[in-house]
Image: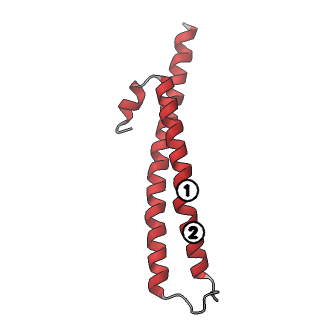
Amino acid sequence: MATDKNARRLPLRQLLTHTEKHNRDLAELLHSDLTPKIADLHELSQPVRRRGQYPTVTALGNALGQLGTLGSDFLKRLDEFLEELDAIRDHANRDRIERRH
């Protein structure tokens, strides 16, 4: 969703569908991109590597940089997802109040 106003104008059903898709994208990003990068960094940070030599400082720096970039992207997407969940809650509260009157 580009802006918060667009999310609040969508019908609840479309908003739920879009948020569910966004949730699946976040899970895929976590499992396919972020988790392997964490595992790679963990392997590099071990004092004795199975392949022989110790990793260079450059290799550790590159791994940290990649992990930082992916982490910041994940956090940005997570913030957008939380905004969508807030929009769903607000929409549901409005509907509940309208039904009472």
Find residue 84 and report its horizontal and vertical position in percent: 48, 36
Find residue 94 and report its horizontal and vertical position in percent: 50, 19
Give the alpha-carbon distance from disc 2 to disc 1, as whole Å: 10 Å
Identity of the residue drawn at 64% across and 89% down = 48
| Sooner in the amino-acid sequence: mark 2 or mark 1 | 1
The type of residue carrying mark 1 is Leu
Find residue 28 and report its horizontal and vertical position in percent: 54, 52
Q: Quadrant of the N terminus?
A: top left
Q: Quadrant of residue 92?
A: top right
Left or right relative to 18: residue 47: right
Identity of the residue drawn at 60% across and 78% down = 43
Query: Of all residues shown, which one is farthest toward the front?
Result: 51
Q: Quadrant of the C terminus?
A: top right
Number of numbered discs? 2
| SS at circle 1 | helix
Residue 38, disc = 2
Query: Of all residues shown, which one is farthest toward the top?
Result: 101
Q: Nearer the viewer, residue 30 or 89?
A: 30
Q: Nearer the viewer, residue 34 or 95?
A: 34
Residue 3, disc = none
Q: Is residue 33 above or below residue 80?
A: below
Left or right relative to 57: residue 54: right
The type of residue carrying mark 2 is Ile
Residue indicated by mark 1: 30
Identity of the residue drawn at 48% across and 54% down = 75
Identity of the residue drawn at 41% across and 28% down = 8
Find residue 4 and report its horizontal and vertical position in percent: 38, 35
Q: Nearer the viewer, residue 64 or 20?
A: 20
Q: Check if mark 2's residue and mark 1's residue have beta carbons within 8 Å.
A: no
Q: Quadrant of residue 72?
A: bottom left
